[in-house]
Amino acid sequence: MAGFEIIIVGGGLAGLSAAIHLSREGKQVLLIEKKAYPRHKVCGEYLSNEVLPYFNSLDIDLENDLKPVQIQNLLYSTQNAKSIETPLKLGGMGLSRYALDNFLLNNAEKNGAETLLDSVENIHFENNEFTVKLSSGKEFEAPVVLGAFGKRSNLDKNLEREFIQEKSSWLAVKGHYEDAGFPENLVALHNFEGGYCGLSKTETGVVNACFMVSYKSFKKYKNTEDFKEKVLFQNAYLRGFFKNAKPIFKKELSIAQISFQEKSIINNHILMLGDAAGLIHPLCGNGMAMAIHSGKIASEAVLSNFTGNKLDRENLENQYRQNWNSHFRNRLKTGRILQKILINPFLASTSQNLVKKFPYLLEKIISKTHGQPIV
């Protein structure tokens, strides 16, 4: 069996950020991802500028290398298309996961991280060491494992995580569209019965449209086109967009069983990162930045407690747990509250009337779901 100091299971934004950070510091890192890059993912594809200082410290230059769209404003509308627009204090970038994930993977490999295309079937911890078993039959050992395997995985079942026992009632659908009239500097969030849809441009010039809907609302209809016609189009903004925009994908991407329940941050000594540790509602527009930030705080905890052959596991786990809760616990809680408000027509309309009367409230809400520049 081959040995590594750190094995990262999952090559999304959290896992890739940790792989870059740790390999830069000379750690022997193996990153295991089950699907090849580049590929599209179901994602809002809006990345808060709060990540820029951290990426700069890793010599990652998104602005010059990937040329993302610069986003400065947020537009929000209720089901009846009453809208409000506000500047985003930090701003953000429109950047496809197709380009971003592949770019970060290349950076990790340049820094010396080894990457492997395979599926992890089981992670076993014994005698202060992990054994990671793959579907190919390969096995690897390491004293540290980071779990960055996303929203919902078979590994969650194997690890007997509590949230996996509960059925999730959410479905997400994503497509790319040609629409020259959509403003480059805008991210839009449009409410409809049972869900919400985000729109923003990416570096390719297309508009990423990603909507999330409850199964209760969606199951009455045969397919996404029928659902759009009968439900999404009740919001005039969404009707105007989808009627005029030209789809790029032959078929929309979708993902089911999305859970917003609280998750264990550490499970059987595995540090959970990104969506594997907790998923913020997409309406908060900050999931990508949070995933990257979680990779940073996990890497810092590992580096400060793993010197030479000495690993202080208890302090490592305490440090990671404390920093995760400090940065994300309240933001996740706020996201859950916002979700309940915005899918309720009465509460959504009432809250918007308050925001229009007191505009500073919207800025306050945004500040509760976005972090400060990550340094």
Image (tube, grey):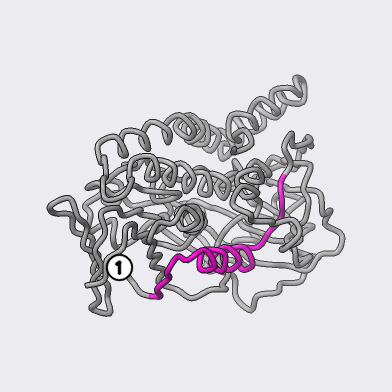
State which quadrant residue 66 falls in.
Answer: bottom right
Residue sitting farthest toward the right: 181
- x then y, percent, for residue 51: 62, 45
Quarter occupied by the C terminus: top right
User: Residue at 13% of width from left, 54% of height from top?
Assistant: 126
Stretch of the chain drawn in magenta: 92-117
Q: Is residue 242 above or below residue 213?
A: below
Horizontal arrangement in the rendering, residue 285 relative to residue 357 (left or right): left
Q: Is residue 265 above or below residue 145?
A: above
- x then y, percent, for residue 282: 56, 47
User: Residue at 40% of width from left, 73% of height from top?
Assistant: 116
Q: Label 1, on which residue?
A: 120
The answer, for residue 102, to whether it is visible in the render is: yes
State which quadrant residue 374 falls in.
Answer: top right
State which quadrant residue 114 falls in.
Answer: bottom left
Residue 218 within the magenta-colored segment of the rendering = no
| Along the line of sight, the residue nearer the viewer: 330 or 248 | 330
- x then y, percent, for residue 45: 64, 56
Residue 100 within the magenta-colored segment of the rendering = yes
| Along the line of sight, the residue nearer the viewer: 102 or 185 | 102
Horizontal arrangement in the rendering, residue 289 relative to residue 131 (left or right): right
Residue sitting farthest toward the front: 308
Quarter occupied by the N terminus: bottom left
Q: Is residue 255 above or below residue 340?
A: below
| Helix, strand or loop status at disc 1 | strand
Residue sitting farthest toward the left: 127
